[in-house]
């Protein structure tokens, strides 16, 4: 831990982008750990702030006497490098929230990379993508498009832009839980809610193994990385134990009291959404490093995490 001038074991943390789905929970996790938190966001938060004006961000952080900054919204290298340069030595730690989409297996999953899949759990040293900007389209999006940011998005050069001894990088899995706009498990939960007799999915999707993380567990990992001095200069995967989608169905079914049948159908309702993926490439992350070096453990057990998804829809009978 860092120590404040009064000797208390606490950190004053600035969470940039701390009002979103994950960032808001990170702020809560830090406060629950006894740390002081300032949230900066464009539309809501303790401070209204524009990340694209790094000088203003740096002045606010200096004014608020924050020793740690968590950057939840670092999507591309140029603005991130400018921000890190503006912060200089005013902060003791910069925490970059990154993604598991940096790994080569992710590129293979989306048919952007060649090479054999890596079937072992991906460590922080596993091969990264060689094809950059995975969400860029052939024709650039217009500047006013809601998803225009995707044309410059890439966590690999963003990580490289700021890597150093005072920087911690946290690579996130697919995050679920209350407030998840992607509704990652809707294809399971919605049929159960409706009392459907079957859940229909392609066999490859059911057997595909990837890493998910409940927002509470992911937030706890980010908070730990930001406040543990051993994390300086390190990169960490975070996430829960990777299991197949078939196992997720079984978990939700047991908790929801659903006794229907899982039907393999390659032309079912999910076929269009996942048809472009090569599901021979798993996205199973190893989280041994964060557990062994920082003592990380989930704050929410797997059944409780799944129940939080079920209970978000109040019409679902348990």
Image: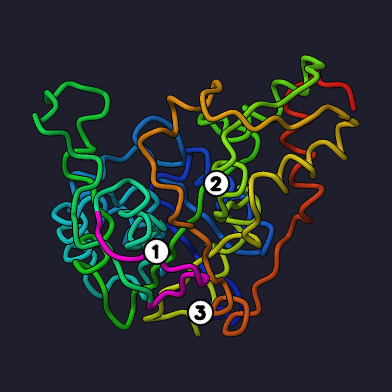
Crowding at mark 3 (Cα within 10 Å: few <14, some 14-19, many 20+): few
Mark 1 or 2, which is nearer the eye?
1
Please name the residue shown 38% across and 78% down the image. Answer: 125
Residue 96 left/right relative to 141: right
Seen in the picture, residue 45 relative to 297 is either above or below; the reply is above
Mark 1–mark 2 Cα distance, whole angstroms, equals 23 Å
Q: Residues within 10 Å of mark 1 (few under 14, many from 20)?
A: some
Which secondary structure lies at badge 3? loop
Q: Which labelled disc corresponds to residue 175?
A: 2
- Hey, which quadrant is residue 24 in on the image? top right
Q: Is residue 257 above or below residue 119?
A: above
Label 3 – label 2 distance at C-alpha: 36 Å
| Farthest residue, direction left | 139
Disc 3 target residue: 5
Q: Please report the bounds of the magenta region as a residue range.
A: 113-125
Give the residue at x 64% y 60%: 240
Q: Is residue 81 left or right of residue 31?
A: left
Q: Nearer the viewer, mark 1 or mark 3?
A: 1
């Amino acid at each position: 831990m860092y120590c404040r001038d009064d000797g208390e074991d606490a950190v004053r943390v600035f969470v940039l982008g701390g009002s979103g789905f994950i960032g808001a929970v990170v702020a809560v996790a830090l406060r629950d750990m006894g740390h002081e938190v300032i949230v900066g966001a464009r539309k809501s938060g303790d401070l209204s702030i524009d990340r694209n004006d790094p000088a203003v961000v740096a002045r606010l952080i200096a004014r608020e006497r924050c020793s740690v900054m968590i950057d939840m919204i670092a999507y591309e290298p140029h603005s991130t490098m400018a921000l890190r340069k503006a912060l200089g030595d005013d902060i003791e730690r910069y925490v970059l929230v990154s993604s598991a989409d940096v790994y080569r297996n992710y590129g293979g999953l989306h048919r952007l990379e060649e090479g054999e899949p890596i079937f072992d759990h991906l460590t922080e040293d596993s091969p990264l993508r060689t094809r950059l900007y995975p969400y860029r389209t052939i024709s650039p999006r217009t500047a006013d498009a809601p998803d225009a940011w995707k044309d410059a998005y890439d966590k690999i050069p963003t990580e490289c832009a700021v890597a150093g001894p005072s920087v911690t990088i946290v690579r996130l899995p697919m995050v679920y839980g209350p407030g998840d706009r992607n509704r990652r498990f809707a294809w399971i939960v919605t049929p159960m809610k409706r009392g459907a007799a079957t859940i229909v999915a392609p066999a490859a999707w059911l057997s595909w193994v990837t890493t998910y993380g409940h927002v509470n567990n992911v937030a706890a990992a980010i908070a730990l990385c930001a406040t543990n001095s051993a994390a300086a200069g390190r990169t960490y995967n975070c996430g829960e134990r990777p299991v197949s989608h078939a196992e997720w169905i079984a978990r939700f079914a047991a908790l929801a009291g659903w006794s229907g049948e899982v039907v393999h159908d390659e032309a079912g309702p999910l076929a269009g959404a996942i048809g472009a993926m090569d599901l021979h490439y798993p996205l199973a992350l190893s989280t041994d490093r964060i557990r062994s070096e920082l003592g990380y453990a989930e704050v929410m057990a797997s059944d409780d995490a799944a129940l939080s998804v079920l209970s978000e829809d109040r019409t679902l009978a348990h």
